[in-house]
Image (cartoon, coloured by chain):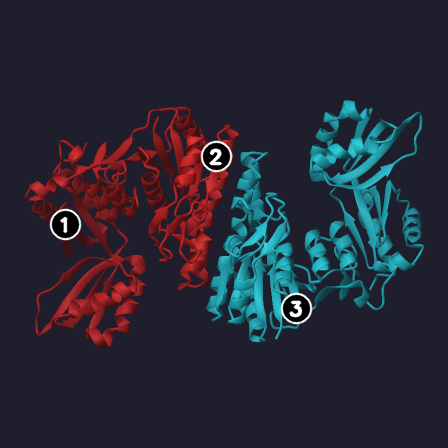
Chain colours: A cyan, B red
Amino acid sequence: MARIVMKFGGTSVADLDRIRIVADRVRRQVEAGDQVAVVVSAMAGVTNQLVGWCQALSPLHDAREYDSVVATGEQVTSGLLAIALQTYGIDARSWLGWQIPLTTDASHGTARIQAIESRQLLARMAQGQVPVVAGFQGIAPTGRVTTLGRGGSDTSAVALAAALRADRCDIYTDVDGVYTTDPRIVPGARRLDRIAYEEMLELASVGAKVLQTRSVELAMKERVRVQVLSSFGAPGEPAVGTLLVDEDEIVEKALVTGIAYARDEAKVTVKNVPDRPGVAAAVFGPLAQAGVNVDMIVQNVSADGTTDMTFTTNQAELPRAIAALDAERAHIGFAQLITDTNVAKISVVGVGMRSHAGVANTMFRTLAEKGINIQVISTSEIKVSVLVGKEYTELAVRALHSAYGLDA
Amino acid sequence: MARIVMKFGGTSVADLDRIRIVADRVRRQVEAGDQVAVVVSAMAGVTNQLVGWCQALSPLHDAREYDSVVATGEQVTSGLLAIALQTYGIDARSWLGWQIPLTTDASHGTARIQAIESRQLLARMAQGQVPVVAGFQGIAPTGRVTTLGRGGSDTSAVALAAALRADRCDIYTDVDGVYTTDPRIVPGARRLDRIAYEEMLELASVGAKVLQTRSVELAMKERVRVQVLSSFGAPGEPAVGTLLVDEDEIVEKALVTGIAYARDEAKVTVKNVPDRPGVAAAVFGPLAQAGVNVDMIVQNVSADGTTDMTFTTNQAELPRAIAALDAERAHIGFAQLITDTNVAKISVVGVGMRSHAGVANTMFRTLAEKGINIQVISTSEIKVSVLVGKEYTELAVRALHSAYGLDA
């Protein structure tokens, strides 16, 4: 007997038929003798509609009210799935964030989980009851409803698995695992049986939208065994997917595990900044205060006592970034802001890089052979990312997938 | 300065434009110097969709899960209206049932309010904040979400008005008051400026779907001055509507105040029940246990030691009624159940009846003149109801409206 958290995303619970299929899948897990807790997202499209309503009423809406509105999506699904499970004779009940309680800080819209009261859930699971937890939501110390940010149900599931000391956290989604790259671009992309947390973290944050980044961080920190599975296979068939594991559980480490891309990046160049100590802080301080997430940062060598600073951020955050910098223009003393959204970030990721030189060079050479100009380069221990013109995305991904021997 | 509870029904908050209009109306009340609390229903159609989902998954769904699902409708509206009010510079915040808390018993689906904690709401209202309360919902002693039954937001509003000792409870709906009968059937129907609680109670329970019956009972018990208003007039214009008052506040009492009808009744005849003491209890006991609300009851004179019992109930409750009786068939000892949904209940209502004879007779004579056969008769102090074939509904209502001199 194992204790398992099963999480189902929005497309997996998109309508009543799919909710029934999910119920059948949970039933099979229960009948296999496991203790099961379920975490659900909102039905596909519902969250977008609720968010759209809040934004239409006020672009700068109260985040506390936004949270109360948006959290209803998961509340609906948790109740419906509990009903569907009961029709299979399973003792199931829904749990809202405030009922558990799953307490968070008061950062409405992007709240972080602080604690999950697991005692009652564990006691009921021991008696055979299946808790159906509304993902994405919690309760702040103020007693108001909070949400964890987009994709937060993944984080709910991993946090719940940690709190319940579950043997595994199965994330059912609309793909059957993590691939070496996007199969829509490279038909020969292969599903990975196992991937290290660190690799998944880099892949998640660079655009392979399988799992929310924070859920992977949390899984890594709490050593939760997360499995990504498709909810679209027949419920009776053995599940195949990708298991997130410790790096040392992967015996034969590939040099490069996967190629990721992101086309929602924006490049900002701050021209002719005075080249003096503290100027980076002057530029990035206001951005941090405005809550702008900066990704790649490049500073050119100085000329004439001034320098250019280039950074990338998500396109959605670009207006806020520009506003924050314009407000500090006199203080920073730059001449001009140049923005470009016609860019794509291409990344190669792999824990094998740690012990191998030449990975970056293979990337640069491959792109050069295809005539693709590299605008910005950024590296980490297990990742090399470059910014290129958006129109080169597919070409670059395909060429790199071949160059690193990832084609099936 | 007055303290006012404003309640807006589903059609009044049906979309974002209408929510903005509601916000504008609340703003005017606040700017007039009043302390205002708002109660909202779900956006029109939302509750039906949520109920439909629960029923599609399981006709006999868990009422606790149903409540958790269905309560989301009002949660969404309360957050959206709070956001809309904030765009007008009004300090507003949403309140869910469990946040207030508005405690109820644990009769899920038809919960009854036990208490409303008003201290925090009153303190915030004194500081100029407008609470936007999600109607229809509460929290049971078990910590689960409850709902008050269809139309329950009216009851939420009246109960809140009582708890806040409000000067008035304004119910904004899609009609501009209570009419002598349905204007869709009788174009000459007149709006009543005032109506006694008792009359409203009879009109509400027989099909004039302006206010939920329980909200009127509560208003009568707590002496809450309820005003029914249209939310579709221009927000700046003086509001006209119908005020619910004590019977003795109505100086000139009409013999008959209004004609109501209900087409969602079902007639059940239990044939050949043994005519012995206790048989009525044997029939209606199981119905009460199954939660079936029985309306009219008629027992025929005995023949051959058996009798026929006829009763009416809501069509929605008919399957449960049949199941409950069939299960007790041997114990009750009846021969046959005959059901008929092709019926309509027509009622004449008026506090003036108390002091006047002949009201019922006028009804019977009027219907006879139109050749309408009366199947069942039921009377109360201020009401006479008859059951007729459904196809006679309009004819009966129009004839009675004229016969009692109600035409404008």
Q: Which residue is mark 3?
A: A167
Q: Residue furthest bottom?
A: B330
Question: Which chain letter goes with mark 3?
Answer: A
Question: Of the residues shown, which amino acid type is indicated by label 3?
Answer: Asp
Tell me, yes or no, if residue B71 can be seen here: yes
Can the viewer see residue B266? no
Q: Residue furthest top?
A: A330
Q: Are marks 2 and 3 in contact (CB under 8 Å)?
A: no
Tag 2 or tag 1, which sits nearer the N-term? 2
Task: Give how far apart the Cα atoms at labels 3 and 1 are.
Answer: 66 Å
Q: Position of residue A57 (x, y in %)?
A: 53, 35
Q: Taking B392 as reference, is A221 above or below it?
A: below
Instruction: Locate the N terminus of chain A and report the quarter of the image it occupies.
Output: bottom right
Element type at mark 3: loop
Near-viewer residue (B54 or B81): B81
Give the side of residue A318 with respect to residue A401, left or right: left
* Mark 2 burial class by Cα count in 10 Å: few <14, some 14-19, many 20+: many
Chain holding disc 2 = B
Separation of marks 1 and 2 at Cα, in angstroms: 45 Å
Residue denoted by label 1: B380
Please tell me the numbered disc located at residue B92. Answer: 2
Label 1 residue SS:
strand
Measured as percent of width and height from the top left, residue B7 is found at 37, 38
Q: Which chain letter matches label 1?
A: B
Kindly identify the amino acid type of the residue bearing the numbered disc 2.
Answer: Ala
Q: Nearer the viewer, mark 1 or mark 2?
A: 2
